Image: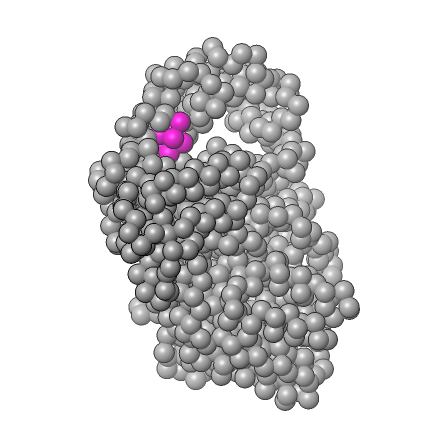
Amino acid sequence: MMRGRWTALSGIALFAATSHVARAADVDAICGGAAAAELPSAADLARAAQAAEGLLRTRSAQPSRAQELLGAPPVQAKASIDPAALAAYCSAAGEAARTSSTGSAWQAQTYLQSAIRYAAQAGGDRVYAQSAYRMALASLGGVVVNGARGGGRRSADPRRIAADIQQVSADECAYLESPDLLQQSTATISAMALSCAAARARRAGDVELAARSSLRLANLLVATAESAPDRQAALRAEAARVSLAAMGATQSGPPAPLMLELLGRLTEAAIGAGAPGDPGVARAIYTMRLHAAGSPAMLAFAYALEGRSALGSADRRRASAALRQAVFYEAQRAQPLRMADWLLLLADAEPEREAELVMDAYRALDQVRPLLPVHDTITEESSFALRMRPVFERAVEIQLAPSAGLERIAAAQTIVEQYREAELQSVLGVNCVAPQAPIRPAELRPDELLLYPILLPDRLELLYATGAEGAKVYHRLPPNGDANRATVAHLVGELTDSASYGDNNRWRAPARHLYELLIKPIEAMISPDTTLVIVPDGPLRALPFSALTAADGRFLIEKTRISIAPSLGYSLPGIDRGAHPLAVVAGSLEQEVILPAGVFPRLEGTAREARVAAEAASSTHGRARLIENFKRADLADALAGGRVDVLHLATHATFNGSSERSFILALDGPVPISDLRRSIGRSRDRGDQLDLLILSACETAVGDDQASMGLAGAAVQAGARSALASLWQVNDVGTAELMKNFYASYSVGKGKAEALRNAQLAMLTRGGEFANPNIWAAFELLGGWR
């Protein structure tokens, strides 16, 4: 039996289950997708929405407080329906749900779709546009990954997503009102919502919102084009059209600083999309210079855009002169936050100084990294993706020049490790989990092999270190110019899209191709007695490495043990536990749980799975605490009651990167990952380190680079040496069987990577449905492998 899908809580379901009297409003009953029988008055709705919007605008006031205000108005049994008031109210409710630590993306989308429908009835273009823009941000920036096993899934194939985006119809706004909307990919929803928001904002005369919507849409189109080479030209052309059109409208109003910044960003997008010579670009640069009013930041931006435009037209001499001016003016700022960007462009204009300028950019980024916000203040995109990743990638490229010796290879590995750590910290949204000194090659055991796949725009690089030769250095394999980030992302998307459904064999070809790219070059160094520790890059974080297939048809897991390290600074090797008795806390949840964020349906088989974990402890004469339908206090008490080696949780879990929005589900509500870490931390303070956290009913966001960091982030945030979790939804019977086989090895002293390999091989050997990679390849070990 497949575990049911996490679903949004509908207004009908909640209202039918609750007897409402003339008390406080129930936001979900009002905005959850169905008309409620009782509503606050239009005046009360308007006042609540206005107060909540005031709090949301300050960004310091806490969306949770806005949620409280929205739930405060008294309901009236015979209140008249006012679509305009309801639209404003549900739009504020959606934004509060999107940004609050207690909300969810699905909840936000549901509320915002109600706001859009009400705004359509009221004819309110301004609220319609605002709600559509918020819908886009909820879809892109707040992906919630549900932990229910079974059910539907959005496609992970980047090319399929690109096709969906390219086919967004001219009637995007009407589709936003469709009941089928939330079945689309998050990128497709966002493209439709942004296009609609821009059109409605222009109609409402809101130039700023139109510009923001167009900018985010252009950036989304370009980002999607990078993972879909066959649609790249069309998507980039559309991005150029969108940004150029918005540039003209943005210059029609007063030259306020924010509007000039938006103009510059749109111009940047147009040039990046392939329109550097368009007359609109020159006009925009002139406007920015004209109104810079002595602002070094704006002057630097204007000169940098002139330099980018000249580079696009192959005029390096003019580009160099303009970019030197950009660097000069940026240096006048108290905080030169974009110095690294302009130095990278200057490196393109002056190739004879490329190495020097790129490393200057790397050092400039290092100086301002602590000052960069997690999300860009204009578009709410990841600052890591916008400002950091390009610098890290170029610095790695410089170190890995064709003639790079061991010293530069070591420097490249150091940069890559900092790159991985910075990305993880960015996705977590906090800096409170400090990395530790990573393991050095000389500390590897003879049977351990470290592999860094590095996906660059023009090639695939592989760095490795092995303990087999007593090496003290990292080595570099010949770069592969036939593969790059885009091609690898496509292959990963094809594999995971097929394997996670488990009903076709399309995964076989990409599994074979990826083996040739990633494993074949090191194949001679692996064996069943080695542990391959992979530090994945970008889309590779969603890849089930165990299912990669060699030319002889054997899976990688048949050839070696495998462990995944988000970064070495966050993944110490662990300890040899040996055959000491296990101390296990095993919690399960089978009952349905209803939260404001949604309904988490009943789970079947989790109690049986938890009993398997408890019995493993008993078999080693250890201690076991089995908690069926556990509550939050039960979990806290169990972790406070002495040493715990294994915490096994068979329940729903959601991971979306930020620890504030990721949680394990207990019977009485969510347990945030941050709270779980504090409980585990108190055990560590007593000298008891949790060795292994098993999250058997979770999944990462397959096909989404940022959200796929959620699982790694949860493992890091939880504070265990290692985590064992699933990349996608797996059925109950398969999960129980794999866990039984895992504990059979782990409880008698096998290392975690070896125990997982033995469990996966046992599934293959058993045959039938258990041999399907959909079941056994979903599980991966993160963190310590010993």
The quadrant in which residue 300 appears is: top right
Q: Quadrant of the C terminus?
A: bottom right
Left or right: where 414 falls relative to 758: right
Magenta span includes 213: yes
Residue 72 lies in the magenta stretch:
no
Identify the main secondary structure in magenta: helix
Does 420 appear above or below 257?
Answer: below
In depth, the one of 414 and 272 nearer the eye is 272
Q: Residue at x 34, y 21 (%)?
A: 249
Q: Which one is in front, 447 or 520?
A: 447
**Vertical placement of residue 716 versus 230, above or below:** below
Residue at x 74% of width, y 61% of height: 443
Q: Is residue 315 visible?
A: no
281 shown above or below 669: above
Is residue 104 something one can see in this rendering?
Answer: yes
x then y, percent, for residue 597: 43, 58
At 70% from the left edge and 72% from the top edge, which residue is drawn?
640
Of residues 560 and 343, the one nearer the viewer is 343
Q: Which residues are magenta?
A: 208-214
Could you say which quadrant of the image residue 692 lies in? bottom right
Picture coordinates of residue 225, whole percent (x, y)? 36, 41
Question: Which quadrant of the figure contains the N terminus?
Answer: bottom left
